[in-house]
Amino acid sequence: MSLRESAADMRDELTRLRHALHRQPELGLDLPRTQEKVLAALAGLPLEIRLGERLSSVTAVLRGARPGPTVLLRGDMDALPVSEHSGAEVTSQVEGRMHACGHDLHTTMLTGAAHLLAARRDQLAGNVIFMFQPGEEGQGGAKIMIDEGVLDAAGERPVAAYALHVISAVLPRGVFITKGGPMMAAADKLVVTVRGAGGHGSAPHRAKDPIPVACEMVTALQTMVTRGFDVFDPVVVTVGSFHAGTVDNVIPEEARFEATIRSFSKPAHRRIQERAVTLVKGIAAAYGLDVQADYQVNYPVTVNNGAEAEFVGTTVREVYGEQRFIEAPQPFTGSEDFSFVADQVPSAFVALGACPPDADPGKAAYNHAPGARFDDAVLPDGAALYAELAVRRLGLTPDPALKGGHRNTVETGGRRPT
């Protein structure tokens, strides 16, 4: 049976696991119940398993029967602090928590891939690292796992790494999308506190009002982006939180705002850090107020290796058909801590449409929304693609020239991934 056919036979088992994960979502780096479910799903497989020390991660290594390189497959496991209102048949049983980004599907697909590859271990020339990662939603779990040795778990660095991510809207169900180069934005956070002197609202000249100064900073940040950065190497600044004052006739002592900052290249990422802080400090100085600007560098740009992205596209077309693959016309503005892996290993980050058939992808609730819904029907295809990428990259594809042997290179449009 092909990997796709074997995965289809696992549909019920995969669906049960995904539903169990969805009912009990956990947040951040500490996911004991999720870790327990993953370990149960992997029980009995010929895997070398190591648990995280600073987080509830699971690193599993499958060693092929013959020597060869190593590839890494990653699935994130954490949920979001969102109250679910999806109307789906299976919903979160934990108030204020929801798998609104589909990480329960990623975890399930990766366990499915482990079963598929373990069943073919005697044919495998090389090793596979399964990276079950907590803390993708802002806690940088991938970086912690790297610090704890996930990239060296098989004894050598992977030659390639792959991650799948489902999308609840925009893409038709079952369609894969990726591209070479920048795939996901860098994401940083700017926290600005402007401090002045409080006073009566009727006599602002006797106070130092921080509100108009903070407002000027907000608008100036937008002007800086449009006038200081190349439109073809964009930067996005969104102020999502602004707090000041208590009542209408009291000038407060301070105003505070928080912004998310997205960029798509390393030069722009470095430059916006300096420019944003310099700007708010200059405005505060012009009005004689104090300011504290805390620029937090979170996730770098997720950059796909060109050859690996091409390899993914070739694999999807051959396994699922031409209509199931789209080359992304531009990067996504969301961010990913798979970027920490991609900084060290040639990688490809791939999105998969998971919009239910009764919903219009153009109108459906997007990832992170309380109403986001994901179709279980994509679970077998995601598991199969994880496995297919691993076996092809390791050279499981029969080479007729070797009379039943196996080749250890992957042809991708005439190029070998590097």
Image: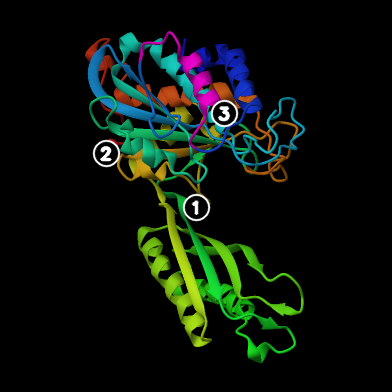
Above or below for 249 versus 412: below
Q: Image point 29% across, 15% down: which residue?
A: 64
Q: Is residue 413 visible?
A: no
Residue 105: numbered disc: 3
Q: Image point 27% across, 24% down: which residue?
A: 154
Q: Which is closer to the viewer, label 1 or label 3?
A: 3
Q: Amino acid at mark 2?
A: Thr
Magenta stretch containing residue 137, yes or no? Answer: no
Q: Secondary structure at mark 3?
A: helix
Q: Amino acid at mark 1?
A: Gln
Q: Is residue 245 visible?
A: yes
Ranked by sequence position, the earlier of labels 3 and 2 is 3
CA separation in Å, label 2 and label 1: 23 Å
- The front one of 59 and 105 is 59
Q: Secondary structure at mark 2?
A: loop
Residue on which disc 2 sits:
418
CA separation in Å, label 1 and label 3: 25 Å
- Report crowding for label 3: few under 14, some 14 to 19, many 20 or more residues within 10 A (C-alpha): many
Q: Amino acid at mark 3?
A: Leu
Q: Secondary structure at mark 1?
A: loop
Residue on which disc 1 sits:
330
Q: In the picture, residue 122 is in which quadrant?
A: top left
Above or below for 190 versus 41: below
Q: Which is closer to the viewer, label 3 or label 2?
A: 3
Percent coordinates x, y for residue 149 in the rendering: 30, 33
Q: Image point 25% across, 32% down: which residue?
A: 157
- The residue segment tinted magenta is 29-47
Ranked by sequence position, the earlier of labels 1 and 3 is 3
